[in-house]
Amino acid sequence: MGERKKSRGLVGWFIVLIVLAVIGVAIWLTVRKKTNHSDSVPSVPDSPGAINSKYSDALKVALQFFDVQKSGKLVDNQIKWRGDSGLTDGKEAGVDLSKGMYDAGDHMKFGFPMAYTATVLSWSILEYGDQMKAVDMLESAKDSLKWITDYLMNAHASDDVLYVQVGDPDADHKCWDRPEDMTEKRPVAQVNSSAPGSDVAAETAAALASASLVFRSSDSTYSSSLLKHAQQLFNFADKNRGLYSMSIPQVQTYYNSTGYGDELLWAAGWLYHATGDKSYVEYVTGENGESFARWGNPTWFSWDDKLPGVHVLLSRVNFFPLKGTPDSANLHNYRKTAKAIMCNVLPKSPSVTSSKTDSGLLWISEWNALQHPVASAFLALVFSDYMLSSRTPKISCDGRSFSPLDLRKFAMSQADYVLGDNPLKMSYLVGYGDKFPQYVHHRGASIPADESPSCSKGWKWLDSTEPNPNVAVGAVVGGPFRNETFVDSRNNTMQVEPSTYNSAVMVALLSGLVATSSVVQSFT
């Protein structure tokens, strides 16, 4: 009797232990599932998924500004109020500089921001060309890119000579006329071994190297020419170091360069992607990286400061290492700094910048305020896609984790602000939405197409109280003040003048938001 009770007691305890074990396993599986879910990376389609019509429509608008800005003999012109212009640019120096694009609302061609425009366009095509193709915009983007790179190759007249400016900015700004009617002299300026310009030469090298990747499969001969010029220009920039704005003091008022180290690293990074030559990785991780990279110090991507672009571009080498790529601590430093750049913009990051408006727009500069938030959003989007495609679940910002989706949401917030999700319900992309600036500071847009005023006879259209008769479709204007006010006045150049480089980063951002797909692990 006693033995049977003892036996039943042991069996009971055994059952209890089994039940507890089952419960424990269930709890462990639940926790594990939740943990894995939080660290998981959603699968990314190889080809573009569902098209976002808002961003697709905006992209189609944004790309048109490059047609608005074209100089030269126009081909298949889609802008009815534009015509041929600048046909003799460069003639006095024996070079054909008729192509290229006017940088903003005037008729100057500045090589430094124009080359940056080309580099950003190339980068957007290389990362998001499949999205562009899905909405039938890829060929338009490539056409605009080639219009610039044709000019840049012509501007590289010999190994150590690069023409970097067409027009006299002081004389140009005394005129208000259509580009088709220009009669004023159009002098050219160059950098060379005696008057160096490492910044503009290296930026042009970056533009041509990145473009060589864009055209490699469709036009190998053109691609080879681009790469040859890029390599020559990089060598010229590296061996003859100096600021172009010191060699050409007149440009300091317009596009003053604050350094050339960022452009040298930028060009070397693009040349590595274009050639696979590991000496370029050694260049950016060795003495030049130590001197110029400013690892751990986030800055703002712009036509003047390429370092944020350098860090994100070279983080690609770390995310997707190619066989034979040298590994070094400094190569990892580029990715670490790219992460710091992300932590600087993520709204809930402990280290997020305080430089933003109440509605969440990054706000770094009073002049051309939209350049930095749009450019930063593009970098965030690229980095998020590197994370997704490499199955990297998160980054940590001072102990707080953020996913690729967090970065994408930030990028969308900046794009949406530009497209009208702001206190004024104003689209700062001209031609998109129901409400956009009507008094864009742009000579060609402000003068009726059937008028042909001389240099000094067109000022009445600058001062006119009537909206522009022509829409500078696709223009991204300067944008709001920090208090989110905006004065739509043609004389308000700080807020209503557009630029090609603003449009370049906007096109890049919108291209990545059109759809979701994995990025290629190699550009070649």
Image: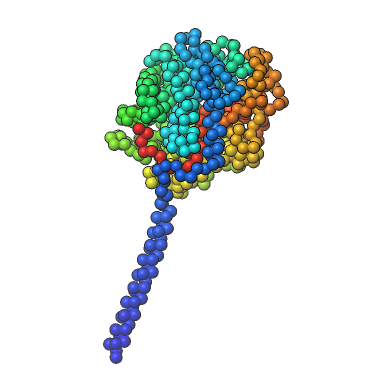
Residue 182 sits in quarter? top right
Nearest the camera: 432 or 81?
81
Residue 314 against residue 198 in the figure, above or below: below
Is 216 in front, or is 188? 216
Picture residue at 54% right of the left edge, 25% below the top = 67
* Rendering quarter of residue 78: top right
Image quadrant in which the N terminus is located: bottom left
Q: In the rendered view, would you say 195 is above or below 463?
A: above
Most extreme residue toward the front is 76
Q: Along the line of sight, which residue is nearer the eye, 41 or 396?
A: 41
Q: How is the image coloured?
A: rainbow
Task: Give how far across and how far down residue 483 sits, in percent.
Answer: 64, 37
Residue at 48% in and 15% down: 97
Residue in view at x 48 percent, y 17 percent? 164
Q: Is residue 476 above or below residue 352?
A: above
Query: How far across and how far down the image is residue 460, in percent?
Result: 70, 19
Residue drawn at 52 percent across, 43 percent down: 52
Rendered-image quadrant of the C terminus: top left
Image side of residue 459 versus residue 150, left or right: right
Query: Residue 420 location, x and y as percent?
Result: 61, 39
On the rendered structure, is 379 left or right of 440? left
Image quadrant of residue 283? top left
Q: Is residue 238 visible?
A: no
Q: Is residue 84 visible?
A: yes
